[in-house]
Image (cartoon, grey):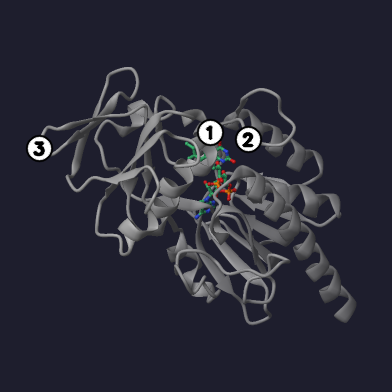
Amino acid sequence: MKEYDIIIIGAGPAGLQAGIHAARRKHSVLILGKPEGSALYQAHIENYFGFKEKIDGKELLLAGIFQCEKFGAEIFKEDAVKLEILEDKNFLVETEKGKKFKGKALILAIGVKRKKKIFKREDQFVGKGLSYCVDCDAWFYRGKRVAVIGDGSAALHGAKTLTQFAEKVYLIPLKEIEGMEEEFFGLPVEVIKQKPVDILGEEEVKGVILEDEKILEVDGIFIEIGAKGALELIAPLGVELDPETFSYVKVDKKMQTSVEGIFACGDLTGPPLQLAKAVGEGCIAGLSASDYIKSKKTQS
Ligand SMILES: Cc1cc2nc3c(=O)[nH]c(=O)nc-3n(C[C@H](O)[C@H](O)[C@H](O)COP(=O)(O)OP(=O)(O)OC[C@H]3O[C@@H](n4cnc5c(N)ncnc54)[C@H](O)[C@@H]3O)c2cc1C
């Protein structure tokens, strides 16, 4: 079984950035995962530092892989299906095709899985008036009319944020959100009680069709149903989760989880689910894992 100083689970921006920093510190580094599984793969980014024009997420990922390999990290494009802590406190990782690797430190960067779709034709409107990220796209709806469809604090936060940009915000809650009316007092938010059934439009979003066939004319639809961490894979490691949501991994400022030698970064540690945060946390996780390996070597 091949052994590495650091094994990184996830080949998105958080994992790749962790890989760049760890490999430049001359550790043996393995990155497991498929770049095409990254949230960034389909995204076009306008709010990332240093780029004057919109950047293609796929291109960024390919450049990140090139950098990782240039600094000596190995990339293995398979998913991990089992993670285990061994008696000697090293980590065992098994992939979907049965390959096994051993690591002295583990960095979890597996992002989040978004919950199921609301509309059948959702995919066709992504980037054409339909967005899953208020923090990313609110800016494009200055002075316009938008609808937020969702539940819980994600929808509440989304609608409130949008009032700073849009002229009118409709909130269509998928279930009752407690204290909603008071939250929006004095803000241009109208709560719609009917269920949304379809998107109006062909090439781009023109509105939302409600169950009573009433139409809300809007320029944009935001779907804010939160995100679910890939917790099934990491549950056996026993890392503590964020006590408020139980959806994200709890980390300290060094991206250290509650288990020694395991670090986490990116979307997996919670909102804002943004590229800049993923990259920043990846950097810290890579350096912290490196410090951990060095301290282990000094002790032995
Ligand atoms: C449509 C869209 C538009 C967006 N627009 C913006 C924007 O404009 N600005 C912005 O800042 N952010 C934007 N984002 C968010 C941004 O893409 C994410 O915050 C960022 O990609 C998170 O990085 P990550 O590395 O934590 O997770 P991800 O990029 O999701 O990467 C996770 C990686 O882990 C891998 N993985 C998962 N499970 C396993 C497993 N079992 N074994 C091995 N690997 C596994 C995946 O395949 C993937 O490689 C957008 C996202 C979407 C979906």
Q: Position of residue 243 (x, y in %)?
A: 49, 74
Residue in the image at 34% along x and 26% along y = 124
The residues bearing labels 2 and 1 have C-alpha atoms spaced at a distance of 10 Å
Answer with mark 3 or mark 1, whichever residue precedes in sequence. Answer: 1
- Disc marking residue 139: 1
Horizontal arrangement in the rendering, residue 75 relative to residue 69 (left or right): left
User: In the image, which disc is placed on residue 212?
Assistant: 3
Q: Quadrant of the N terminus?
A: bottom right
For marks 2 and 1, the one nearer the N-term is: 2
Q: Residue furthest left?
A: 212
For mark 2, what is the residue?
A: 47
Element at label 1: helix
From where the camera sits, is residue 130 visible?
yes
Identify the element where label 3 is drawn: loop
* Marks 2 & 1, CB-CB < 8 Å contact: yes
* Residue 18 in picture, x, y percent from top left: 72, 52
